[in-house]
Amino acid sequence: RTSGDCSVVVGGKFNSTGSAGYSFIGGGISNVGNTATSIGGGRQNTTSNSYATISGGYRNTSSGSKSGVLGGQCNTASGSYSTISGGYLNTSSSLASSVGGGRKNLAQGIYSKIGGGICNNTCNATSNCLALGSVVVGGVGNNTTGGTWDLATCVFTVAPTICNVGSMSFVGGGFQNRVTGDCSVVVGGRNNLACVGTSFVGGGNTNIASAF
């Protein structure tokens, strides 16, 4: 269903752009578009800001201006120019932030990136500017602490606590590594912490880099 100027719904079922203009839905079921947005297909996907795009998947939301979701399920790209390639329950919520895939990852810092994994975060509760350019390539629960990880099901049965990250920080992978210092690095391992600027941990278990 469409009544807006220059809007198109090609096919599918129960798709709607309402009165929005210059929007496009290619097909699928119960997708909802807004002004100057596009949805390729899938089911119950929603675009709600100008030039937002969803290619497909299920219950994805692209609500940031010029944001995009390629596919997956229950992903949300809410920052301007933010992107999510796929996965499940991922969120990309800041300017030009991105998540490649995985599950329950949160990219909240400006220009921050998460490649994949589970429950990884690039966040700073004080300001998303303080997590500027932070990166997590993959792993589990990086930039979090606590929680209960169930190895049999590969999920946190008790959610971990998200930790603030430093700007331009980097985690390669591993389990619950944290980078709180600006330009700090943890390559991998488990429960490692780089907590001052330009500090470095290569790997291992429960190492702390707390001085230059």
Image (cartoon, helix red, strand yellow):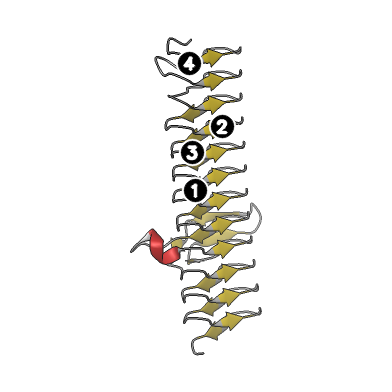
- Marks 1 and 2 in Cβ contact (< 8 Å): no
Residue at the image position 48 percent from the left and 62 percent from the top: 147
What whole-number distance in Å separates the C-alpha atoms at marks 1 and 3? 13 Å
Quick one: label 1, few (<14), some, or many (20+) residues within 10 Å?
A: many
Quick one: label 4, few (<14), some, or many (20+) residues within 10 Å?
A: many
Position above or below: 207 against 75? below
- Marks 3 and 4 in Cβ contact (< 8 Å): no
Q: Which residue is mark 1?
A: 92
Q: Which mark is residue 16?
A: 4
Quick one: label 2, few (<14), some, or many (20+) residues within 10 Å?
A: many
Q: Which residue is mark 3?
A: 66
What whole-number distance in Å separates the C-alpha atoms at marks 4 and 1? 25 Å
| Amino acid on which disc 3 is placed | Lys
Q: Earlier in the sequence, mark 3 or mark 4?
A: 4
| Amino acid on which disc 4 is placed | Ser
What whole-number distance in Å separates the C-alpha atoms at marks 3 and 2? 11 Å
Q: Which mark is residue 54?
A: 2
Q: Earlier in the sequence, mark 3 or mark 2?
A: 2
Q: Position of residue 34 (x, y in %)?
A: 43, 24
For label 1, the SS is strand
- Marks 4 and 2 in Cβ contact (< 8 Å): no
Q: Observer-nearest residue: 179 or 150?
A: 179
Q: Position of residue 65 (x, y in %)?
A: 44, 38
Q: Position of residue 124 (x, y in %)?
A: 40, 63
Left or right of 120 in this view: 203 = right
- Marks 3 and 2 in Cβ contact (< 8 Å): no
